[in-house]
Image (cartoon, grey):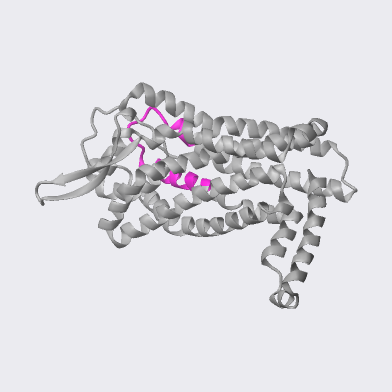
């Protein structure tokens, strides 16, 4: 997520004078939606290195029209399948309640990225329609981008905290970790992050721009009065950077260290119950590691370049295109981790989606319900052992 000067954002979106305006921080979600507009405003930019500009334009083109569509299609499909499987009664555990919430947040993020890809393609095909769609969508896309990233961060923390309790404090975990508490935590994270990121929903507005020379009206995006108050911008931006990435990363690294240390100290599992529990722990640690790896570059860029500059150069913009792509990768790959490490997830997925048609036709609906009920009871017993 890119940290940018607010007046520079006004230049890119409204093609207006940008001198003497206070700094306003934005994120890479801003840059991705604004990237196509920058090419129309090169006359307002200082002369920069040609190779840097080529790198930025190539990064914009490759991420926006190649990688985002691929990861969004794969990730949206995987997250929807994950929600269906993990929401089943046979998969009802506290851990899976957190994972369902995480899949919903990732779906919001990927949907937002998919709209960006559509807008980018539309700008190349029909610039007038593309820019109109950009200016209408941008204030909302900016909010949903940030709120989804915040929700993902804190649900990852919740998953890590629960697994830490189950691995390092198993006795206390039996009373503290429950499905009801997990669901309440998921609801609290969604509501609290939605409220805490409300200022981002009030950051931009779509405004009409009348052109006297042609006597027609177009639309642009302008910064609201709230985000022209420098003291508010500085205080909220630092708070939001900490809330969205810095604090969650620190907590996740600490909890992961203790979880991995506990796994290394335990003897190799010899029973089926211990093996299953260990696999689920490894799966969740993998989810945490992927999150930390994908979010850390964005956190560093946002913190380092969030203040003290007037306008980012083309090299920094290109780098931020790549760091934001990593956030999309993080939202798209959890389904692969579930299938790789969680054999209970695989069994339920196969039962729901991958059974052979000839086998399904050979049973009556009554026998099929009985067979699935028997399978569900066996997986319930296995799942209870895992947690």
Q: Nearer the viewer, residue 218 or 353?
A: 353
* Residue 296 in view (yes/no): no
The image shows residue 32 at horizontal and vertical percentages of 39, 47
The image shows residue 250 at horizontal and vertical percentages of 61, 30
On the picture, is 299 further left or further right than 121? right
Which residue range is magenta in the image? 301-327
Residue 307 falls within the magenta-colored stretch: yes
Name the residue at the top extreme: 231
The residue at 36%/37% (across/down) is 312
Residue 123 falls within the magenta-colored stretch: no
The residue at 70%/43% (across/down) is 95
Quadrant for the N terminus, please.
top left
The image shows residue 117, relative to residue 227, as above or below, that is: below
Quadrant for the C terminus, please.
top right
Q: Which of 210 and 70 is in front in this view?
A: 210
The image shows residue 70 at horizontal and vertical percentages of 50, 59
The image shows residue 251 at horizontal and vertical percentages of 64, 31
Magenta highlight: main SS: helix
* Residue 90 in view (yes/no): yes
């Amino acid at each position: 997520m890119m940290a940018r000067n607010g007046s520079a954002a006004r230049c890119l979106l409204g093609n207006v004078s940008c001198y003497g305006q206070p700094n306003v921080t934005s994120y890479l979600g801003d840059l991705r939606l604004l990237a196509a507009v920058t090419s129309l405003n090169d006359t307002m930019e200082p002369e920069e290195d040609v190779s840097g500009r080529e790198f930025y334009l190539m990064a914009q083109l490759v991420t926006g029209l190649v990688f985002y569509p691929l990861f969004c299609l794969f990730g949206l499909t995987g997250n929807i399948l994950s929600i269906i499987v993990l929401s089943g009664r046979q998969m009802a555990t506290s851990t899976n309640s957190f994972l369902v919430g995480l899949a919903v947040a990732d779906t919001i993020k990927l949907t937002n990225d998919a709209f960006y890809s559509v807008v980018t393609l539309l700008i190349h095909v029909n610039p007038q329609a593309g820019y109109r769609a950009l200016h209408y969508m941008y204030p909302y896309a900016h909010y949903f981008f940030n709120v989804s990233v915040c929700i993902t961060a804190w649900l990852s923390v919740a998953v890590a905290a629960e697994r830490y309790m189950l691995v390092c404090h198993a006795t206390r975990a039996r009373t503290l970790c429950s499905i009801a508490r997990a669901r309440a935590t998921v609801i609290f994270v969604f509501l609290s992050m939605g409220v805490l990121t409300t200022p981002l929903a009030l950051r931009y507005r779509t405004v009409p721009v009348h052109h006297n020379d042609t006597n027609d009206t177009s639309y642009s995006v302008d910064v609201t009065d709230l985000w022209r108050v420098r003291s508010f911008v500085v205080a909220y931006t630092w708070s939001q950077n900490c809330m969205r990435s810095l604090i969650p990363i620190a907590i996740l690294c600490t909890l992961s260290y203790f979880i991995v240390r506990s796994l290394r100290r335990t003897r190799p599992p010899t029973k089926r119950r211990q093996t299953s529990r260990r696999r689920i722990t490894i799966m969740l640690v993998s989810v945490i590691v992927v999150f930390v790896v994908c979010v850390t570059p964005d956190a560093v860029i946002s913190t380092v370049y969030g203040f003290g500059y007037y306008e980012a150069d083309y090299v920094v913009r290109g780098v931020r295109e790549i760091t934001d792509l990593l956030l999309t990768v993080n939202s798209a790959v959890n389904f692969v981790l579930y299938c790789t490490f969680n054999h209970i997830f695989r069994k339920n997925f196969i039962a729901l989606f991958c059974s052979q048609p000839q086998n399904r036709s050979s049973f009556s609906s009554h026998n099929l319900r009985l067979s699935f009920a028997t399978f569900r009871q066996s997986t319930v017993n296995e799942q209870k052992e895992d947690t």
